[in-house]
Image (cartoon, coloured by chain):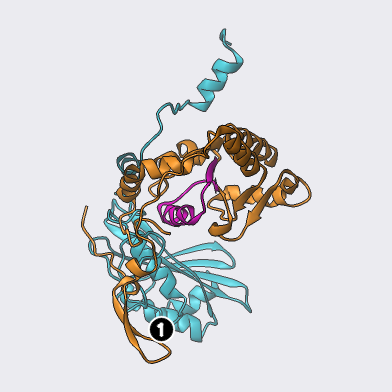
Chain colours: A cyan, B orange
Amino acid sequence: MHPLYERLKHLFPLDEVTEQRPDLLFVTLPREHLRSLLLHLRDIEGFSHLVLLTAVDWIEEGQFQLTYLLHNRPKAQDIGVRIKLARDSATMESIHTLWPTAATYQRELREMFGIDFPGSPGVEEDFILEGWIDLPPYRRDFDTKKFSDENYNHRPGRETHDPAEYMKQQLYPNGL
Amino acid sequence: MQSKDFSKAELQKRTVTGPDGVEFEVDPMRDYFCEAPPTVMPPAYIKIVEDLFNWARAESIWILGFGTGCGAIEMRPLMTPRFDAYRYGIQWRPTPRQANLFVISGYLSVKTLKRAIRSYEQMQNPKYVVGLGSCTINGGMYWDSYNTIKRLDDYLPVDLYITGCMPRPEALLQGFMDLKKVIRAGNAEGANRYAENFAWYKANQKQIIHDWDMPEYSW
């Protein structure tokens, strides 16, 4: 098993582990242990860089999955920390005190997924969308096509073809 | 759909103390902009003079350097020696006040549309709009996107479209030549169309820009 995992598994209740590559490990753990694990990784294991913070919408399970990807520059090693949180009125503790840059990711997640991070600086402000009035657009129950049809005028005359069928028609009009 | 409060603090009426210590009230939405809507500019009194004007306009197309989508990348080879649009009297200007051609270079998100409308309204008459690429015509590859418009001519008066995704610089040059013909024929009346149908354009714009926090007419 991965040496980093060997060191971590005695300290934290890790649920599920994926060793993607020798230099990339994903661990899952309950959300209440996230902050202590991130602190441990940052201050003791040397993962000083928050690469990204992103979300996945597992709508069938009623959960959001947050992934905190950290990088250890001297060892050229990455670790992704995954947590699951309930999809309804999703709220997560902010980590902007650990990495100030996390505030930007959290602002984006609030706007695009509707995950709230109370206390994160500027999290209430508009990030990319201005004047958004519908469901957060990256949620999977948001119907992009329907929203587009209802809100933006289409120019008539747009045709859509199945590429394979269309090229067959074009190249072999009399059949194969 | 829920209603949200989009009022912004910097747009509220406030009391400001000037450098000489005098206090005065500032209402940003009224004091910094002219409230009068645009007016239709009639042609010159006789046709030959108008033709002369149109010839002069066609020979000095000044483009606003505002790249909205990926199409803006085509502007660089166009303005540099490889394709050298300057030899046709076409040049790029840094501010809307100095430009008379607005090239909408690709997809417009709602957020960018707001800025494009304000930039367009700040341009001097006579002014022209060219829609570049399929995104401005029918949405292109962003036809089902939640945040981009599909028909540019619902929001701004377009004089000419250049098709392609992306159009090559040669296609743009050809488009500019065609625009010159349109201008010289006296048919590039986009600014007057905008003034005539001002209410219709504003209604279309406000239909999708939900946090309307700018003056009716940015001049």
Q: Is residue B14 above or below residue B217?
A: below
Residue B130 horizontal/vertical position (percent): 55, 42
What residue lies at 30% left-to-right and 41% top-to-bottom? A150
- For the point 49% across and 41% down, which residue is it? B136
Residue type, label 1:
Thr
Chain of the residue under the numbered disc 1 shown in the image:
A
Which one is in front, A41 or B216?
B216
The boundaries of the magenta stretch are: B102-131
Please identify the quadrant where the C terminus of chain A is shown.
top right
> Circle 1: is it few (<14), some (14-19), or many (20+) Cα within 10 Å?
few
Whether residue A96 is visible: yes
- The question of residue A23 being in magenta is answered with no
Q: Which residue is mark 1?
A: A97
- Most extreme residue toward the right is B81
Identity of the residue furthest to the top in this view: A174
Along the line of sight, the residue nearer the viewer: A12 or B129: B129
Q: Is residue B113 magenta?
A: yes
- Residue sitting farthest toward the left: B2
| Figure label count | 1
Q: Position of residue A96 (x, y in %)?
A: 41, 79
- Quarter of the view holding residue A57: bottom left
Residue B152 position in % (x across, y down): 45, 42
Identify the residue at image location x=67%, y=43%. Answer: B59
